Amino acid sequence: MGLMDFIKKQFIDIIQWTEDDNSTLAYRYPMADMEIQYGGSLTVRESQMAVFVNEGKVADVFKPGMYKLTTQTIPILTYLKNWDKLFESPFKSEVYFFSTRAQLDFKWGTPQAITVRDKDFGAVRLRAFGNYSFHLVDPAKFHTTISGTRERYAATELDGQLKGLILQNISDAIASSGIAFLDLAANQIEFANALKTQVGPAFEAMGLQLDQMTVQNVSLPEELQKILDQKIGMGMVGNDMGKFMQYQTAQAIPGLASGAGGGGSGVVGDAMGLGAGVALGQVLAQNLQAGLQGSAVAAQATAQAAAAQAAASVVKPEEIMATLEKLGDLKAKGILTDEEFAAKKADLLKKLV
């Protein structure tokens, strides 16, 4: 190299990176044709790490701090270059900075319902969404597997890949958590922790650490949501069958009332039109009273009174058959007990003789 070329040659004596955005994970320090001055300084700020790369190979990794670049502070690069201890000339090396700040509020969600296995229901479908946060912990691994020699690599470029990993592991996370499907909505923290444990190794393989995982909502299919609502209702009344009958009756009354108001087309409307409305009304009223008192005797007396009034009604054979069908529906819905239904059926059949 001639004297003028040496004079024109530019040397870098301070290497540092001031982050100018919130999303850059990897940044290649601009070198052009410049060389790094031996004895120059490298400044790595908090929430950063730096990596020296020589001919495509990761050499020295620097954590936060200020370093004087000598053969003692860049031992791997010194070994790769075969420098002796007296080396004091400028040198070339690629320098990459990595942000280790927490990347917050990355969102995940199921674009459509996914099928998972459940110990109670076999295969079920669900929708869920939440968010997660992560940070870079292994710059050498991230450089070799993800960012490479690019000038910049943004965290947002990982969004699709990381979201896919989460969705891929939801089924296994539910299985490993041991949480019953119907309990997922009430145990979102446990579900989130199980999902974090399941997905964590996939993040580590890229040099990342999954810090936090949240499940903000789990949507159950409509049919299972109804079962969950019934389970909640059962939990409210406990083992008191009287109160359970009260709960079931209260759930059924709105639908029955709407049927009665629709020109006699509903269950109660038909029953009233057949002369059994008074009896059925008393059955419902007495069931409510029996539920509050927890008295099986009161319920039996109510059934007998209702049967007596129903028997007193004069109806046609076809009306009797229609009434039996409606009473069968009430029994199927739990409003009438087997004993009450049997008593009403016997009384109505007597009128066919």
Image: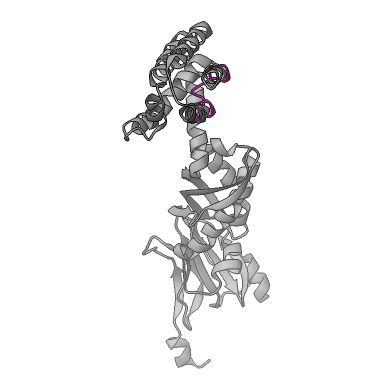
Occupied quadrant, residue 13: bottom left
Residue 12 percent location from the top left of the image: 45, 75
Decide if residue 320 is on the left or right side of residue 263.
right
Residue 321 percent location from the top left of the image: 51, 29
Q: What's the magenta bit mostly, secondary-structure-wise?
A: helix
Residue situated in front as seen by the camera: 34 or 58: 58
Eyeballing the image, is 90 above or below 325?
A: below
Let me know if residue 90 appears in the view. Answer: yes
Q: How many numbered marks appear?
A: 0
Let me know if residue 85 appears in the view. Answer: no
Residue situated in front as seen by the camera: 19 or 106: 106
Q: Magenta stretch containing residue 248, yes or no?
A: no
Residue 317 percent location from the top left of the image: 49, 27
Of the 4 image quadrants, the one containing the C terminus is top right
Eyeballing the image, is 2 above or below 309?
A: below
Q: Image point 48% across, 19% down: which residue?
A: 245
Q: Magenta stretch containing residue 332, yes or no?
A: yes
Eyeballing the image, is 82 above or below 309?
A: below
Residue situated in front as seen by the camera: 294 or 273: 273
First to last magenta residue range: 329-341
Q: Image point 48% across, 51% down: which residue?
A: 133
| Direction front: furthest residue | 353
Residue 264 percent location from the top left of the image: 35, 32
Eyeballing the image, is 240 above or below 123?
A: above
Decide if residue 141 is on the left or right side of residue 299.
right
Q: Image point 55% across, 16% down: which residue?
A: 343
